[in-house]
Amino acid sequence: MNKTTVLVTGGAGFIGSHLCDRLLSEGFRVICLDNLITGSLHNLRRSSGCNRFIFKKHNLEKYIAIKGKLDFVLHFASLASPADYLKFPIQTLNAGSLATYTTLDLAKKKRARYILASTSEVYGDPLVHPQREEYWGNVNPVGVRSCYDESKRFAEALTMAYHRVHKLNTSIIRIFNTYGPRMRINDGRAVPNFIHQALNNRPLSVYGRGRQTRSFCYIDDLIEGILRIMRSDKIGPLNLGNPKEFTILRLAKLVLKLTAGKGGITFKPLPQDDPRQRCPDITLVKKLFNWQPAIELGEGLKMTIEWFSKRKRFP
Ligand SMILES: NC(=O)c1ccc[n+]([C@@H]2O[C@H](COP(=O)([O-])OP(=O)(O)OC[C@H]3O[C@@H](n4cnc5c(N)ncnc54)[C@H](O)[C@@H]3O)[C@@H](O)[C@H]2O)c1
């Protein structure tokens, strides 16, 4: 039996729960810590049926006590969607600072490999396109989004300090927009927002003229990339995301087509500090791990729409 034990923080959230499922399916023991601020135990229904899985409700801002050995600590807990971090800016900063400290300290005690889920938001509104890992970013440190961007930049700095001072085996993954089943219908991100509106025949809210670009990676592709990085000894930072760039307007039209939504599109004012362009350069992960997304946007959207359509009566 595989005795390798992985701690997943934020495991009741969108990405964390898929990560728990996949780790269990590969035979790992998984401990999930989450305070359920945005996560849900529903996301863990599959994992909970496995006797190698343990869930503990815990706020990671506080000291973590875990008995026994840990081989990996995957720190995925953070408020992550603009709607959430605008509502909980202090908890967001704490997830990048205090919770990163408690999890790094635990990894140090257990001599575990530590993986930080960082974000493309560290590049801010980028002046370099597509974004390579060497780019230092263009972030407004006092804007409304700074609670997220700066908390992740701090988390990256703290992770590197533990790596340099304590020789901790660490890695930083900069995740670009990811979508799929288990996103919350009301979390404000473009994909669930559009699908929810389209399935209810409401107009799709496009901000600005919809010319801003994003790249959309299906969850299964992302999880595959995370596992390859976890099993390696690479430090990063490493971009993971889909390098195919789409305008938000094109995404809206595709969702309308796939759902046969009848509400059309409505244009709304652009939010403050909304990045105009976002696209990963994934040359490094391609070279190191032979990783690139395999699931086309249309295919991934179909699977996501199918999942959401079973929940379309949610508010
Ligand atoms: N989804 C994306 O497109 C995306 C993109 C870039 C980076 N990320 C990063 O990936 C990680 C997961 O994102 P997600 O989309 O799954 O978000 P999510 O909101 O679905 O999941 C985050 C989880 O963290 C938990 N959490 C937050 N603060 C906590 C705390 N103090 N103690 C314990 N648990 C806490 C929440 O309850 C939730 O279950 C985050 O670190 C996020 O910054 C996600």
Image (cartoon, grey):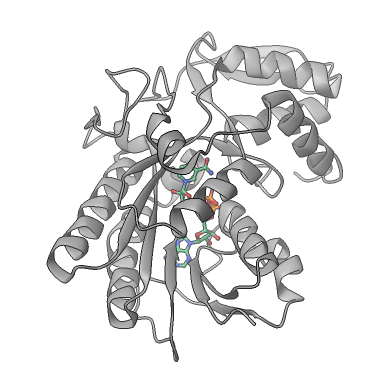
Up-down: is 55 above or below 95?
A: below
Q: Is 294 left or right of 95, judged from the image as shown?
A: right
Q: Is 7 left or right of 156, judged from the image as shown?
A: right
Seen at 78% across and 46% down, the residue is 314
Please tell me in which quadrant of the rendered image residue 66 appears: bottom left
Up-down: is 161 above or below 123?
A: below
- Towards the viewer: 91 or 229: 229
Up-down: is 313 above or below 260?
A: below
Quarter of the image with the N terminus in it: bottom right
Q: Residue 243, image x and y in percent?
A: 50, 24
**Hey, which residue is sitting farthest bottom in the picture?**
67
Q: Residue 151, image x and y in percent?
A: 29, 50
Q: Residue 15, image x and y in percent?
A: 57, 52
Q: Residue 294, image x and y in percent?
A: 65, 33
Q: Is 225 left or right of 255, judged from the image as shown?
A: left
Q: Is 98 left or right of 300, judged from the image as shown?
A: left
Quarter of the image with the C terminus in it: top right
Up-down: is 211 above or below 274?
A: above
Q: Is residue 76 visible?
A: no
- Towards the viewer: 133 or 145: 133
Seen at 67% across and 18% down, the residue is 252
**Hey, which residue is sitting farthest left in the picture?**
165
Please tell me in which quadrant of the rendered image residue 160 appears: bottom left
- Please count the marks in the image: 0
Q: Is residue 240 visible?
A: yes
Seen at 37% across and 36% down, the residue is 121
Seen at 68% across and 26% down, the residue is 296
